[in-house]
Image: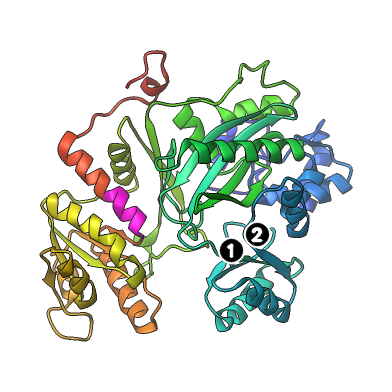
Amino acid sequence: MINCNPETVSTDYDTSARLYFEPLTREDVLNIIEEEKPQGVIIQFGGQTPLNLAIPLREAGVKILGTSPESIDRTEDRKRFRTLLKKLQLLQAQGGTATSISEARKIAKRIGYPVLVRPSYVLGGRAMELVYDEEGLNEFMKKAVEASPKRPILIDKFLDDAIEVDVDCVSDGKQVVVCGIMEHIEEAGIHSGDSACAIPPYTLSREIQEIMKENTYALARELRVKGLMNIQYAIKNDQVYVLEVNPRASRTVPYVSKATGVPWAKVATQVILGKSLKELGILREVEIKHNAIKEAVFPFNRFPGIDIVLGPEMKSTGEVMGIDASFGVAFMKSQIAAGQNLPLKGKVFISVKDSDKRAIVFVVKKLVDLGFSIVVTSGTAEVLGKAGIEVREVFKIGEGRPNIMDLVKNNEISLIINTPSGKKKMKEDEARIRSSAVFHRIPVITTVSGARAAVNGIEAITKKGFEVHALQDYHSPYALP
């Protein structure tokens, strides 16, 4: 095994006979291959970096085991990827590739703002940004070109308010089995590594899930995948769009394995080495009776003053899982594990952008029913007042005292729900409130969908409490209900 990551290298002694702690560059990898003379190399378990080495290694005469470098390039090269989706008649958000700012402007004008700008062949959504106008496009094109100067820049129409879904599958080249369908709790636009996810999906219809499965089978067969593959979909107005195809193990594999009770990385390794899924007894999808919620862990408390708002660039440094028969309880367990201690009583400060004001009313009504008192600023107070909700109004920053910052510093607030607005002055004030909340260890939720899930969790815990069971109990022949 070759690993360049000091955070994970400690686990490799149990997995491999020999461990090289070296940079994952063409030169370093070829030096090790010359020394070890392996029969072949598996590149699909190390994320994006080894995938980028697929073609350089093949050109150096190294045998790549599993999915071929040619298939990998069909998914990584944006023009070839569009051709692939057209051939299979799969939907994709409008977009294009640009190598200059002028090309980027033309594409953005044609498809309309907002657009998602990102370099190709990069890690963790680096330099990826949601852009609302030409000024923003010019600014972020400069960053994107710096991050990946020799690769084209990808510009896609942003699907506002879409539901994002991750699908992992395993294929032996002939048969394809879906390992898990993970519905993101946060809307599309937040990096998949930063979003909470649910297995099984908690709002998607059977019909939508079947369409995603059929799309996944078609892509895996066309690409002749051998091993694991991850696909990211977006659902908008009951239409299924393909966002991205990764012909490798995704960061979701450990989560899907624990949720379903199947060691998918082990299954994929045996498939890569020549076994069929039938021989391994993997004949159909695993259907689970419980709910497994993945939550991201963030390092914000180590960086005083940082704004915690999430976007297309990945910020999380780990993940945890909550598991239970009830979705609400499983979500609450995931929050406890991630260090986000949601309160069961107290004052909730709510400030949401205009487009979220209608959606937040139901969430606030639930909180009031659960015994919370609501603190708001003038704009939100007006909307909630019309809905018949009793609130306490406080000053915005700079309008008078006591303002919301005073309440945060005095530990009077138990929870903050704040969806960021686009206005510059408001953005700055909201960022100050959020960073102050992190300093005072007050949980902050920045999306309406996240607030809905949190209220669901608070209600479930208040009414039922929860039990703790071993992971194995959920996967035994006498599995819990």
Write down the quadrant of residue 15 in the picture: top right
The residue that appears at 52% across and 62% down in the rendered structure is: 312
Q: Is residue 116 above or below residue 336?
A: below
Helix, strand or loop at label 2? It is loop
Q: Are marks 2 and 1 in contact (CB under 8 Å)?
A: yes
Quadrant for the C terminus in the image: top left
Q: Which amino acid type is marked by label 1? A: Arg
Relative image position of residue 9 (x, y in whole percent) = 57, 42
Residue 373 rendering spot, x and y as whole percentages: 11, 60
Q: Which residue was labeled with disc 2?
A: 122
Specify the farthest residue to the top. Answer: 477
| Amino acid type at image mark 2 | Val
* Badge 1 element: loop
Q: Label 2: few (<14), some or many (≥20) within 10 Å?
A: some
* Residue density around tag 1, few if under 14, some if 14–19, many if 20 or more, within 10 Å: some
Is residue 55 shown above or below 13? below
Q: Which residue is mark 1?
A: 126
